[in-house]
Amino acid sequence: MGGGMTQRTELRSLLRAKQNGECCYCGAGMVRSKGGNVPKGGLPPRTETFEQLRRRIDGGGNNRDNLALARAECNTGR
């Protein structure tokens, strides 16, 4: 997902709108990431995170068509 913070912010906004603010796995609402460093205890469970739909090991990449937003608890629980 090359590019700077502005590109990531724009992509996050596009995905959020496309998904109606819902997690790509469970469909529950998400809260926006505040950016910056991850807190010591990890992200709060409802925080939106980028998710690769097709894993890198399976040939997926960081292109827009392979990314979605998932709640932190769903993303780490896979």
Image: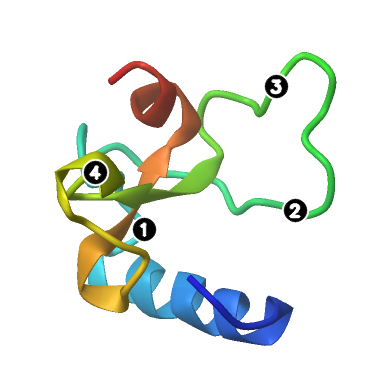
Q: Nearer the viewer, mark 1 or mark 3?
A: 3
Q: Quadrant of residue 62?
A: bottom left
What is the CA distance from the residue labelled 4 to the residue labelled 1? 22 Å
What is the CA distance from the residue labelled 2 to the residue labelled 4? 25 Å
Residue placed at 36% from the left, 48% from the top?
A: 51
What is the CA distance from the residue labelled 2 to the residue labelled 3? 13 Å
What is the CA distance from the residue labelled 4 to the residue labelled 3? 22 Å
Mark 3 and mark 2 in contact (Cβ < 8 Å)? no
> Looking at the picture, how far across and down is residue 8, in whole percent?
57, 75
Q: Secondary structure at mark 3?
A: loop
Identify the residue position indicated by label 2 in the image: 34
Check the image and report above or below for 23 versus 18.
above
Q: Nearer the viewer, mark 2 or mark 4?
A: 4
Check the image and report above or below for 73 versus 61.
above
Identify the residue position indicated by label 1 in the image: 21
Which residue type does callout 1 highlight? Gly
Residue placed at 35% from the left, 16% from the top?
A: 77
> Looking at the picture, how far across and down is residue 72, in whole percent?
48, 31
Q: Earlier in the sequence, mark 4 or mark 1?
A: 1
What is the CA distance from the residue labelled 1 to the residue labelled 3? 21 Å
Q: Secondary structure at mark 4?
A: loop
Identify the residue position indicated by label 4 in the image: 55
Is 70 on the left or on the right of 58, as rendered? right
Question: How is the rendered protein coloured?
Answer: rainbow
Front residue of 72 and 46: 72
> Looking at the picture, how far across and down is residue 14, in whole percent?
38, 80
Identify the residue position indicated by label 3 in the image: 42
Which residue type does callout 3 highlight? Gly
Q: Earlier in the sequence, mark 2 or mark 3?
A: 2
Front residue of 65 and 24: 65
